[in-house]
Amino acid sequence: MRTNLNTLAVVRNLGILAHVDAGKTTVTERILYATGTTHKRGEVHDGTTVTDFDPQERDRGITIFAAAVSCAWDGHRINLIDTPGHIDFADEVERSLRVLDGAVAVFDAVAGVEPQSESVWRQADRHGVPRIAFVNKLDRAGADLDTAVASIRERLHPAPLVVQLPIGAEDGFRGIVDLVRMRALVWADGADTAVEEQVPEEMREEVQRRRRLLEEAVAELHAGALDEFCARSTLSPGTLVAALRDLTGSGDGVVVLCGSAYRNRGIEPLLDAVVAYLPSPLDVPAVRGLRDGVEEDRPADPSAPFAALAFKVSATSTGRLTYLRVYSGTIGKGDTVFDSGARRGERIGRILRVQADRHAQVDRAVAGDIVAVVGLKSARPGATLCAPDAPLLLEPPSVADPVVSVAVEARRSTDTDRLASALARLAEEDPSLVVRTDTETGQTVLSGMGELHLEVAVEKIRREVGLDINVGRPRVSYRETVGRGVSGFVFRHVKQDGGAGQFAHVILDVEPLETGSGFEFRSTVVGGRVPQEYIRAVEAGCRDALAEGPLGGHPVTGLRVTLTDGSTHVKDSSDTAFRTAGRLGLRDALRSCAMVLLEPVVEVTVTVPEDAVGTVLGDLAARRGRVTGSATRAGAAVVTATVPLAELFGYATRLRSRTQGRGTFTARPVGYAAAPVAVAPR
């Protein structure tokens, strides 16, 4: 037992998080190279990276699918997940963060905190994942560590604790000063490892000042460090490391390191920081789930009952892989596990240690492991797998509602069944993809998180299944809400067709919700005129009515419904009657309300040469965009605007043509806004 727990103490499960093109995949490649896992440095631009192994990732030069790899450093095993940076694949990040114990957030030293950096940081906040920050690309023109740190402080609001300073700037960046151990690490041109040296003479005064600032910041946040600081007016390296680890785990501070992954500078100190500051499975709280409706904790103990969460499913040429995070217990090849959601048993065929698209078979997996298993037939992402004699249900990762849809059909009618199977497999692998049949047109509709998300999904079918597919123009998911409500709306549901009839009488108030989203139901009925069980039926019926609004059949949100009165019949009233009354009554009430159509809007950050700003602003205005900010950064203009999602289709091509290929943009959802009547979808 003691040996197993000691083994868990040297495990680190972490993810690499960042905005598109901040260098996540390059950081991962350099980690694999520094740990001896690979013997050649992979490059994104050459399509030779380990984690971006999918043909589409190599063609597009971006990470699309979260990839897991394992490596060893300083006696520790590091299970690492390289996550996507594009907003369309935020669901991949969400599922990964659900099973990670820590993360490295990568920031561009020129751009600082970018929109998707902020989004993934907030996702990590929701999951309580401790992070350290790595400011990358210090060799770029315009790179500045202090500016990047200031953006972390201003936009993400943690206390940044800078533990390294760069030696040299831009092209002259050649090393770092470690403020914890007061040493310099210098990389010669072409060298893969650093040479430890004395702090350069010209930097010593600044280094002493920065070390003092670091000690003061840590002492202000950590009680143990404060005691030593007050007694000695300084902090020992051991105290500083222990305090930084505590602050990282609590989220009260974020350790900031720096380097250039492309030039392989700063990676070994980053690995040292992962080991020193990020938690092991033993350091995080025991996973909590439900057993027979009662909360139960499962500790990270190999001898405890088995519990694991499936966070990714992938169909490969060798079979269906289900990626698991094992929280407690042990499983071996051939064991039977219980899927708590599907309420069925599954047999583990093989257990694999994952190295992106390569796998090594292992005999067993224990608490703290991230592995893939072969043989599970029904487990979906978010499924809980547990010991049959100790069932447990863990909270699955949340899945965002899709915002963009396209109609898809096979060009040859004989391929219709093959397309249906391929779409079903896609939705099984990626819960953020939704496949449905339009009841009015009979078309098959594929919905996802963005234009690129759907483009990748369709291309995957074309490549892997070999199908020719026709794709309709993308459509966005609209919503409807109440602009002005109604009071005292009376609805009677009376049905008599032989035998027991149906009777329900309800009076409803409908009003806008102050928050602008969601649905609230309440009852002010007095005197038992509507029994409590019928009130619950009315609420269920009202929720049924929210599926289709009166403007265009879109989902309804942002309203409060109050049941103020009603009456029953001694024989004909029932749950069914009152549920029907709730559904039909709210549907009629909404037709009497002043309804507002809502369209999804996104925050767009456009980076263009300064001489193209006018053109870009005019184009954004033509797309009903509202500019919210602008700045100049390293010779380029950065414009932020809020734009309706429907207006962004094809924007990437338009931006490239208007800026001679020099403009780029990113977008992140910010919610819904009222749509002009002129753009209402037919």
Image (cartoon, helix red, strand yellow):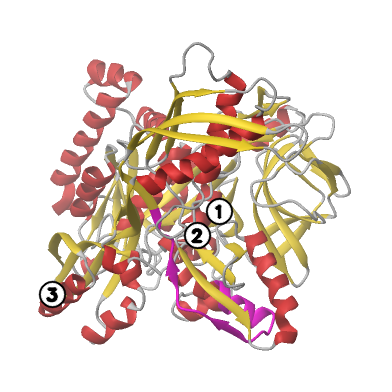
> In this view of the protein, can residue 224 be seen by the observer?
yes
Q: Residue at x 57, y 36 (%)?
A: 493
Is residue 529 shown above or below 658?
above
- Sequence-earlier tag: 1 or 3: 1
The secondary structure type at the circle numbered 3 is helix
How crowded pointer 3 is (Cα within 10 Å; few <14, some 14-19, many 20+) is rated as many
Image coordinates of residue 63 in percent, x first then y, are 49, 67
Q: Residue at x 21, y 65 (%)?
A: 625
- Sequence-earlier tag: 2 or 3: 2
User: What amino acid type should be assigned to the residue bearing mark 3?
Assistant: Val
| CB within 8 Å, label 1 to label 3 | no
Q: Residue at x 65, y 40 (%)?
A: 368
Query: Foreground: 637 or 292?
Result: 292
From the viewer's perspective, tell me whether residue 288 is left or right of residue 155.
right
Residue identified by numbered label 1:
80
The secondary structure type at the circle numbered 1 is strand
Residue identified by numbered label 3:
613
Image coordinates of residue 485 in percent, x first then y, are 32, 39
Give the position of the C terminus as an image quadrant.
bottom left
The Cα–Cα distance between marks 2 and 1, rounded to whole angstroms, is: 10 Å
Residue identified by numbered label 2:
31
What is the residue that sits farthest to the top in this orientation?
Answer: 527
- Span shown in magenta: 457-479
User: What amino acid type should be assigned to the residue bearing mark 1?
Assistant: Leu
How crowded pointer 1 is (Cα within 10 Å; few <14, some 14-19, many 20+) is rated as many
